Image (spheres, grey):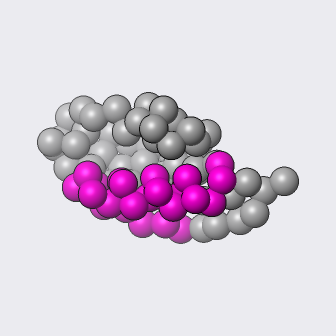
């Protein structure tokens, strides 16, 4: 299992989208919200993606197509 910490930044048009739900449903990942500050106009979130390497990579690639700013911060191998 991979554990990857990612910062996400959203502008107005992205703040109302269910990103966490999509990550869990479409990529079968566990998503841990480490920090977040989201309002109507702007939001950021630091999340941990937990799952198989291939799914984590696919999820990050998908996030990069959504208009969100995506900054992977840290990666570690889980047990």
Residue 59 seen in the current view: yes
Would residue 14 appear left or right of 57 to someone viewing this image?
A: left
Q: Is residue 58 above or below residue 75?
A: above
User: Could you tell me which residue is drawn at 71 percent across and 65 percent down?
Assistant: 76
Whole-percent x and y of residue 26? Answer: 45, 38
The quadrant in which residue 64 appears is: bottom left
In the figure, 40 relative to 78: above or below?
above
Vertical side of 69 occupied by 19: above or below: above
Q: Is residue 14 rendered magenta in the image?
A: no
The quadrant holding residue 60 is bottom left
Q: Quadrant of the N terminus?
A: bottom right
Judge from the rendering whether residue 6 lies leftward or rightward of residue 70; answer left or right.
right
Identified at 27% across, 57% down, the residue is: 65
Residue 48 picture location, percent across and down: 58, 50
The residue under the point 65% across, 53% down is 52
Give the extent of the magenta segment: 51-73
Q: Nearer the viewer, residue 60 or 6?
A: 60
Rendered image quadrant of residue 68? bottom left
User: Which residue is outermost to the right?
Assistant: 79
């Amino acid at each position: 299992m991979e554990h990857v910490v990612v910062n996400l930044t959203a502008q107005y048009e992205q703040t109302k989208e269910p990103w966490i739900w999509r990550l869990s449903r479409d990529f079968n990942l566990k998503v841990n919200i480490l920090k977040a500050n989201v309002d109507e106009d702007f939001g950021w979130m630091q999340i941990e993606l937990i799952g198989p390497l291939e799914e984590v990579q696919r999820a990050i690639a998908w996030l990069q197509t959504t208009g969100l700013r995506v900054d992977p911060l840290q990666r570690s191998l889980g047990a």
